[in-house]
Amino acid sequence: MERNYRNNLILLVLYLGIVLWSAWKPYGRLVWLMQSLAALLVVLVLILTYKRFRFTTFIYIVVLVHMTIILIGAHYTYSRNPLFELLKTELGLSRNYYDRVGHFFQGFGPALMAREILIRGNHVKRGRMLTFIVVTMCLGMSAFYELLELGTSYLLGLPVEVVMGMQGSSWDSQWDMLMALIGSIAALALFSRIHDRSLKSNSVYRKSEHKKT
């Protein structure tokens, strides 16, 4: 069995285990479904497109971390995460900040995924323009997600504060988008070189580079 395939399979098994844990007696079934839907759909798309476009194992690790954060948030709800409730009490904070972590990774994970797609598809060369496009894509995605949450609350007749986890902050959506922006910039600044090394060791990418030359 190919080493990368085996590693990716292990990551998938870990993900399924986390899904089962998250779905076991969550805070609320409907809330769990709504907040975990993104994690379920993203991985489903990755499975269905695996033979057509296989990401590097590095990206799948990043995806697993991102999906785990989403599924933990879905289990407890983002505004009731127990660890961050403890921090809220001990530090005298005004709110549970777990949702900020979630939105940070909403920019972090997609930034590296988008970077790999653009590089391997030869759409954009490495450099400032690649960084600009990736960061802009992540910010746009975050804004779309906020609009999607808003639309969902109206369609289902649920309070906006509950669906969007505002916790009394009228600027919650803007903070969420800012965290996604910071996450995307941090991902590119800290992990671009590691990502490049992962790309160079990827057999599919090496074949595409060979064809160009």
Image: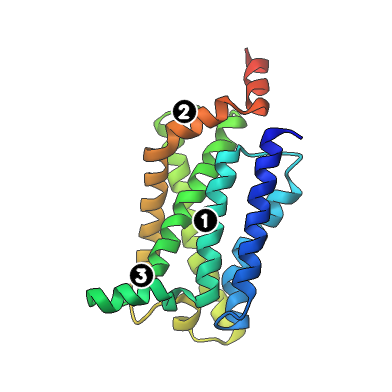
Helix, strand or loop at label 2? It is loop
Label whose residue precedes the other's in the sequence (2 or 1): 1
Q: Position of residue 61 (x, y in %)?
A: 56, 46
**Residue 165 appears in the picture as rendered:** yes
Label whose residue precedes the other's in the sequence (3 or 2): 3
> How many residues crowd mark 2 within 10 Å: few (<14), some (14–19), many (20+)?
few
Q: Nearer the viewer, residue 200 or 85?
A: 85
Tell me the residue at 36%/77% (across/down): 85
Read off the residue under disc 2.
Answer: 126
Q: Quadrant of residue 37?
A: bottom right
> How many residues crowd mark 1 within 10 Å: few (<14), some (14–19), many (20+)?
many
Q: Position of residue 119 (x, y in %)?
A: 55, 31
Q: Position of residue 42 (x, y in %)?
A: 64, 56
Q: Position of residue 161 (x, y in %)?
A: 44, 82
> How many residues crowd mark 3 within 10 Å: few (<14), some (14–19), many (20+)?
some
Q: Which mark is residue 97?
A: 3
Q: Nearer the viewer, residue 84 or 173?
A: 84
Seen as rendered, the residue at the extreme top is 213
Q: Are marks 2 and 1 in contact (CB under 8 Å)?
A: no
Label whose residue precedes the other's in the sequence (1 or 3): 1
Inspect the image, locate mark 3, and give the three-letter code of the amino acid beneath it.
Answer: Tyr
